[in-house]
Amino acid sequence: MNSPEQQSGSNSPRAESETQPRPARTPPNRRVDHRAAARQFLDSPVHAESHDTRVWALRQRRDRTAGAVPEWEELRETASQIKNHALTHLDQYLEQFADTAAASGIHVHWAADAAEHNRIVHEIFERHGVQKVIKSKSMLMEECGFRTYMDRAGYDMIETDLGERIQQLDEEDPSHVVVPAVHKMRSDVSRVFSKTLDADAANDDAHYLTETQRQATRPLILDADAGMTGANFAIAETGSFVVCTNEGNADLSANVPDLHVASIGIEKVIPRVADLGVFIRLLSRSALGSPITQYTSHFRAPKSGGEMHVVLVDNGRSERLGSDKFWSALKCIRCGACMNTCPVFRRSGGLSYGATYTGPLGLILDPSIDARRYSNLPFASTLNGSCTNVCPVKINIHEQIFEWRRILVQDQQVPWIKRSSLAAAGRVLSSPKTFRAAIRTTQSALYYLPDWAIYNRLNSWGKERDMPTIPGEGTFHDWYRNNRMHDRNTNKDTD
Amino acid sequence: MPDQPNPEGSQNARVGSRIGLFIPCFIDAFYPEVGIATLHLLERLGCPVDYPFDQTCCSQPMVNAGGHAESAATQQLFVDNFSDYEVIVAPSGSCVHQVRDNLTAIEQTPAVQHVRNNTYELVEYLHDVLKIDAFPWAHFPYRVGYHDSCNTLRNLGHGKPSELNGTDFSKPRALLEKVAGIKLVTPERPDECCGFGGTFSVTEPEVSSRMGRDKVADHQRAGADYIVSADSSCLMHQAGCASRSGIPMRFLHIAQILNGSVP
């Protein structure tokens, strides 16, 4: 799904002299350093300002279209309950979906993890002698590292979503689940296309760039041996699945070649067609503030003479379903509203998360993929709770971020220095006497006092902010002793 | 959360309840005038108020950073200081949220539950319990941008957050509107987080400061002379950002205005 605004693009800004900030890739076995990447992003002021403005505009449009639906909060509650029901009866609905789909002539496969998914699709392609593949946007395929896997196996994989295609040509991950290239300005896109599509480097007109990509990609689509899509919803009742896009690229991917393979996470299943309307009303309003995506395509059987495969992928989902605190993250419909509203995401850019899933959603999904590697992410949040309020399926995102912090500290996934200073703060704050001594000076107070001073030294606070000063007349505690305890003691004496 | 306390159902909160005043550690150290204004205001409204002398902190610094076991002794000290009071009142939304919703590192004895169920943030206490309809002693002839801290807005329910559909309301604005001379102004992003976020302010100082500068600049464009809030921690952060980037903005806790302790 891509923003119509991004396609027309005439308002999209340029940054002539500022190159796009690119965070360094985190080596294996290292923690992703969100702070360093965010700092780098903010050091590119044109990109940073534009990103905040554009992504905030999506949130504002969401507010306007959601505000025009009087039963909006009831819709959210209904969607949440449908997902709760579907997920707590997942085995039954998955089997119903698989049986019904098979009865319509769809080949259904089950993949326990990313490796199995990649192998299954690879085998299908080998059987059919496929070389050239077109695909539409799929977060699940990103999660499985599927394109990299197929690239290594010697296949030509072509992204057909405009934003994804830009990111593919630039050899960069998507930065947002809905608008994958939203961190780029049109001058950045112009640079990418002039290098890869032979576009005129001096022309960064959005219409020109879009048309250039279209002309370059259309022949690849017509020439493809197989098409891949994801799915936004899989309907148990009908054995059909639904893909929502704004570019129609999923329809091209699915319909032009004779072979269509859809990769679907097992959490995507909903019971009935009647449930679908609830989600369709919420999805694009939450994502982009438009009432519905341009295309809402239903797939229920292979075309005549063609073949259709569905790969149902677990990849950690069953395990999450068994988790008391985190199972409800499986309700996510990937609308990206939590990213659009997140003040940290808007100011740090999606690439700063160094992970498939970015923003608030990433903070609660990524640590279960690799707790140590992503252990900094749940701390890249102010816990402001706005993400929870915009979530169309009512996932308690900020409470899960809070819970991840507890688990990461408890399981010793955060650095020792941080854990030891938590213990030190706990000792100071649980002893009135030590505490009183600690807050005698600004320096010691800022070190020992709340949240902001737990393990960082003063320069963290003071780098871009001035420090408060200890008032000359002393603390409230001193004031109370001098002005009230005296009275109380005097009264006691005279009693 | 099934074990969520429900202060609105509390039997203790009424006019005349004996209040244990909780002055959070950073207000104690940096903003004693906020503590004094809170005490004076409650007293002039007829409340009997004590200040338990051995209090330190609500334990949020550790819990916010994931350290629950490390917070247990501080939580116990808090309960020991306050469990004898009918109600506990504090001029800080984030600390009240901590006590009410996250005081969970210790055994949930009746004393702990009593404290969690009867701790109020000052604005709630004035608006919901005492139902104050006038502050005749207060006069504040300035343009005020009110800062809804995320904890008061989204965790304590001070008002309707901009993300939700429904009827607009705001308890702190309802109180401020009773102050003579005041003019409330609204920034473009009325309830975007200011970037303090507790431990976030030092784990991500660049993003945090950027958010703080953006917040102050938004109020400045709206014409505010003062930014006023029920959370001094947000204000301390915003004041630090404003002064470093040369934005001439003044900051006050809502207690100072309602008490009439400022010009």
Image (cartoon, coloured by chain):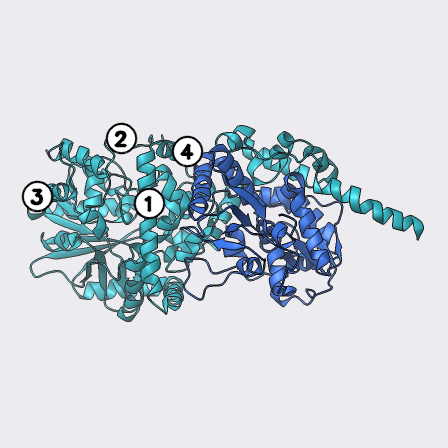
Chain colours: A cyan, B blue
Q: B109 above or below A358? A: below
* Residue B187 x %, y %: 43, 50
Do the residues under discs 3 and 2 have CB atoms within 8 angstroms?
Answer: no
Question: Are the residues under badges 2 and 4 in a single subunit?
Answer: yes
Which is more foreground, mark 3 or mark 1?
Answer: 1
State which tag comes first along the sequence, 3 or 1. 1
Mark carried by residue A215: 3
Please tell me which residue is depicted at 46% across the width and 63% down the height of the picture: B168
The residue carrying pointer 3 sits among few (fewer than 14), some (14 to 19) or many (20 or more) residues within 10 Å by Cα, namely few
> Would you say B90 lies left or right of A27 here?
right
Per the image, label 1 sits on a secondary structure element best described as helix
Residue linked to disc 1: A53
Q: Amino acid at mark 3?
A: Gln
Q: Quadrant of residue A60?
A: bottom left
Q: Residue A166: in sight, yes or no?
A: yes
Question: Are the residues under badges 3 and 4 in a single subunit?
Answer: yes
